[in-house]
Image: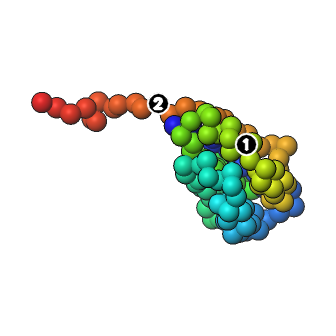
Amino acid sequence: MVKLTCLLRRKPGMSPEEFHTYWREHHGPLVASTQSATHVVRYEQHHRPLSSYTNVAVGVTGGGDDGYDGVTEQWFASLDEYQAHLAEKDFKEVWSDLENFLDTSRLEFVLTEETVVVMPGDVPRP
């Protein structure tokens, strides 16, 4: 399994509420409606809680209006499927939509291969 993980920040001037609504109600359905999505095993949106934007407690990481607004993951069966996803004609439509709600100059992402790690508690005992 290959996973694309993106750390997202909303575009300047956009409120947290506007960002999360757009991402959930427009961008997510757009992604799901494309031919490029046929190469995706799983698409996840992880939204930052709106209440964390007003948390100004001392020592709380991510309090206030700083930090990331969310994380998205896309899973692919293989690197070939990821590359096929990028090659679809309608992928450009998805990519251009990012400018509507993301600060693309600060978009961070990593492509990884899933490695199964077995923890001692997961090992069957005789």
Element type where label 1 sits in the image = helix
Q: Which amino acid is tagged 2?
A: Thr
Residue for point 55% across, 31% down: 113
Residue count near mark 1 (Cα–Cα under 10 Å), binned few <14, some 14–19, many ≥20: some
Residue for point 73% across, 42% down: 86
Q: Residue furthest right?
A: 13
Residue 54 seen: no
Q: Quadrant of residue 6?
A: top right
In this figure, which residue is indicated by the disc labeled 1?
Answer: 86
Residue 115, label in figure:
2
Q: Is 11 left or right of 124, judged from the image as shown? A: right
Q: Position of residue 34 (x, y in %)?
A: 70, 58
Instruction: Indicate whether 78 appears above or below 67.
Output: above
Element type where label 2 sits in the image = loop
Residue for point 54% across, 49% down: 41
Instruction: Indicate whether 40 appears above or below 2.
Output: below
